Amino acid sequence: DTEVTQTPKHLVMGMTNKKSLKCEQHMGHRAMYWYKQKAKKPPELMFVYSYEKLSINESVPSRFSPECPNSSLLNLHLHALQPEDSALYLCASSQDHGSGANVLTFGAGSRLTVL
Amino acid sequence: AQKITQTQPGMFVQEKEAVTLDCTYDTSDPSYGLFWYKQPSSGEMIFLIYQGSYDQQNATEGRYSLNFQKARKSANLVISASQLGDSAMYFCAMRERTGFQKLVFGTGTRLLVSP
């Protein structure tokens, strides 16, 4: 069983809808991440939260809005998306330090389809 | 800027044989970490093995070993005694000390294990 839980597993939405992706971890990790993965491509970093504060935004369009309500939860709010935003959205968490492996643990992903 | 290159889009191996997946990297940071992840068709990214740039010995984890050649900037993954369940996408990734929250992935290699 994965230690990072993402919901929903699948989401279909229209371009005018507002929806949210949710991610939860209980490993005591203080960094949480959103990655976007298009078909047959590697994951690409979108956002990083460190100690519940946004530390990295990789120039992501404002129709994606991240939120970190507490150290265990990470949300990605979606609004006015485009069909090209259809992808697998992966959440990950890790200890937040630069030494050692600092391995990212990923969830199973939320597969988003925008019609 | 860091860069990861995986030149093998696909690899085939027979069950019980060993296989090497290639990865080269480029960085000007003397302190960095190299990772291999496995992604089955289900979508979850599974951590396999880690090598730090200052580690003197090659990393090993069960059937996985990392052939780290620092001067050549290569970090190849060796899977011994392949199993049918090893069929998946394999991503090499790197994180630099100066930007330790950014884990950047290569393009991946799809491995197919045949009986």
Image (tube, grey):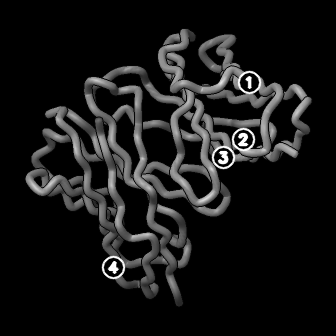
Query: Between residues B30 and A15, which one lies in front from this camera angle?
Result: A15
Instruction: Write down the residue under mark 1.
Output: A63
Camera-nearest residue between B15 and B3? B3
Q: In the rendered image of this protein, does residue A36 appear above or below residue A99? A: below
Q: Could you say which quadrant of the image residue A71 lies in?
A: top right
Q: How many marks?
A: 4
Residue designated by label 4: B18
Distance CA(mark 1)–CA(mark 4): 46 Å
Residues at badges 2 and 1 in contact (C-beta under 8 Å)?
yes
Q: Determine the CA span between mark 3 and mark 4.
A: 28 Å
Secondary structure under the numbered disc 4 in the rendered image: loop
Q: Residues within 10 Å of mark 4 (few under 14, many from 20)?
A: some
Is A97 on the left or on the right of B10, as rendered?
Answer: left
Frontmost of labels 1 and 4 is 1
Indicate the chain on which mark 3 is placed: A
Numbered mark located on residue A85 in the image: 2
Instruction: Kindly identify the amino acid type of the residue bearing the numbered disc 3.
Output: Ala
Q: Is residue B29 left or right of residue B113?
A: left
Same chain under badges 3 and 4? The reply is no
Q: Residue at x 54, y 67 (%)?
A: B88
Q: Secondary structure at mark 2?
A: helix
Nearest to N terminus: mark 3 or mark 2: 2
Q: Nearer the viewer, mark 2 or mark 4?
A: 2
